[in-house]
Amino acid sequence: MRLHDSFINEFGQMEGTAFFPYFNKDITVVCKEGVSSEYTEKCLGYLEEMDDALMLQICKYAEFFLKATLENTSVGELDDEEAFPYDDLLDLLQYISFETLYIEEPPESIKDASETKVLNLTGGCEWWEDEGLQCLVRDGEVVYLGYFEDLSVWGDYSEMYIGNYVLYESYRERLLEYKKNMVVKPGDGQTRTQSFYDHWNEKESLIRQKITNLVNHISAKESISFGEAVVTLEDTYFYQLMNDYPQILEENVEFWCECYRIEKETDAGELMRHVCENCDGI
C-alpha cells in the first residue's frame, strides 16, 4: 500500500492519504520527521492487516471508556447507558471514528523494533467529542486507548492507570482497594503521622512545605487534629496518585486542595478527570 497525494505540511512532515480497508475509506497519514518511504509502506501494510480480532480488542477498551464516562458524567448529561445502545462490542464502531494514522521511525534503543508491527491511530468517539481518541497498537496488542494525548507508539504505558482504558480493570481493582481502606482506625494517628513524616522527609524542601500546607488545610477544613488530617489524606485516592505520578508533586498546593475537595465532594472518577485535564504529563 502506498501513500497518496503526499505533500509537506506546515510542520515539515510528510502528509497524505491511504486507504483503510477495514472501514472502506481513506484516512490521513502523517509521517513524523525522519520517516523513510520504506517504513511508511511497511506501516501502511499493518493498517491493511487490521481485522476483527484487533478491532474487538479496541472495542473492549472503548467500552470501558464509555462506561467510565457514563459513570462520571454530571447529572443531566450522559447519565444513561442507553444513550449509546449496542448489541455487541463491534457495534460500538458506530460511535467511533479513526481519521489519522501517525507514523514514526522506531527508536534505536528498542531491540528488533523495525520488525514490530505498530499503529498509532487517532480520531474521535461520540461520548468524548471535545478531546478526541487515540489508540496505540504493538504487535497485535492494544497498549493504549483513551483521550488523545499525542502519545508515541513506542512509549511504555504499562503503569498509566489514568486515562488508559487498557488498564481500566486494574484501575477499578485499585479503586476498590482504596475504598476498603478508607475507614480511619482508632489510634492510627500517631504511628501513621511518623510514617508520613519519614516518607516526605525524603523529598525536597518545597514539596515538604506544600504537603504540610495541604495537611493543615485538611485539618482546618475538617476541624480535626494534624495527625487525624494525615490519616484522612493518606486514605484518599488522590494521595495514592501523588505517590504514583511525580508530575502531581510539581503542581501548587492550591491544585492539591482542589483535588482533595473534588474527591471528597464527588468521587475518584471526577478526581481522575480533573487531574487528567489539568496536570501536564498525565
Image (tube, helix red, strand yellow):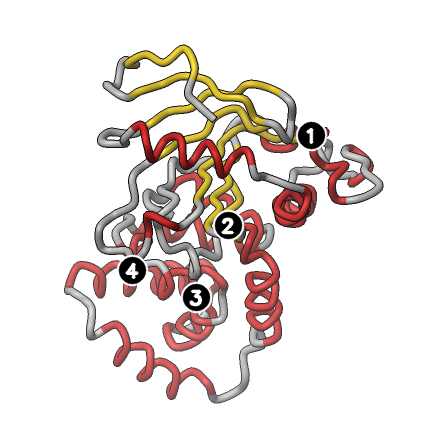
Query: Do tag 1 and tag 4 residues touch (Cβ < 8 Å)?
Result: no
Q: Nearer the viewer, mark 2 or mark 3?
A: 2
Residue at image position (46%, 65%) is 223
Q: Is residue 21 above or below residue 274?
A: above
Q: Residue 50: image x %, image y %?
A: 59, 39
Residue at image position (42%, 61%) is 159
What numbered label is drawn on residue 213? 4
The crowd level at tag 4 (other Cα within 10 Å; few <14, some 14-19, many 20+) is some
**Front-most of residues 192 and 147:** 147
Q: Which residue is mark 1?
A: 95
Gap between marks 4 and 3 measured at Cα: 18 Å
Which structural element holds mark 2? loop
Q: Residue 157: image x %, image y %?
A: 41, 55
Q: Which residue is mark 3?
A: 240
Which structural element holds mark 4? helix
Amino acid beneath label 2: Asn
Q: Residue 271: image x %, image y %?
A: 51, 50
Q: Which residue is mark 2?
A: 164
